[in-house]
Image: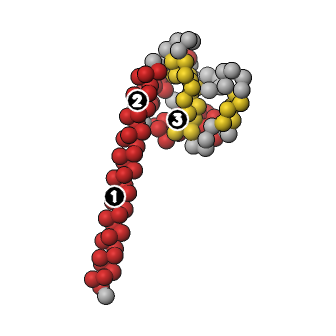
Amino acid sequence: MKQMIRRLSRVGDSSQYEGKDGRRRGVPEGHVPVYVGDGEEEVERFVVRAELLSRPAFVELLHRSAQEYGYDQRGVLRIPCPVPVFRRVLRSLLAASAAVAAEEAQVDLLRSFDEEFLALAAS
């Protein structure tokens, strides 16, 4: 699994990759391209934030990918999952990520107020 995540980070660092249709497509820094689908006909391309790869739900998807296709896949990662299910998982991961970021911002804000209050109290 660690080998797959290292390989994915290299793919995510590249600015372009060749899609299934042969066209060059850009991948934003810090993101990884994946093909999701449970069959050849229903496959959709997603660009996923690399930080989500370590989340338990995504790790499970990576395990399923390794079971289905092996650890030495070539090119863009393929995930054997129905597209609607993957969308729900992705939305859930992004919402959780946003909630954590919002909570961290609130803590930082409270800390800054504490520092300002202590500075005023000391004067």
Foreground residue among 6 and 47: 47
- Is residue 89 among what the camera can see? yes
Q: Secondary structure at mark 3?
A: strand
Instruction: Specify the label residue 106 is tagged with.
Output: 1
Amino acid at pointer 2: Val
Question: Where's residue 106, x and y in %?
Answer: 33, 58
Residue that appears at 61% across and 22% down:
73
Instruction: Name the colour scheme.
Output: secondary structure
- Please give the name of the residue rendered at 52% of the width and 39% of the height, measured from the top-left corner: 49
Q: Is residue 116 left or right of residue 36?
A: left
Residue appearing at x 34%, y 76% in the figure: 116
Q: Point out which mark residue 86 bears.
A: none
Q: Is residue 98 above or below residue 1?
A: below
Q: Quadrant of residue 92?
A: top left
Q: Amino acid at mark 1?
A: Gln
- Label 1 and label 2: CA atoms lie apart by 26 Å
Calculate the distance from the C-alpha at mark 3 to the C-alpha at mark 1. 26 Å
Spatial distance from mark 3 to mark 2, Cα to Cα? 12 Å
- Residue in the foreground of this view, choosing between 103 and 55: 103
Q: Which residue is mark 3?
A: 48
Residue 66 visible in the snapshot: no
Q: Which residue is at the front of the view, 91 or 79? A: 91
Relative image position of residue 46 (x, y in whole percent): 54, 29
Q: Secondary structure at mark 1?
A: helix
Instruction: Tell me the quarter of the picture where residue 59 sits.
Output: top left
Q: Name the residue beneath numbered marker 2.
A: 89
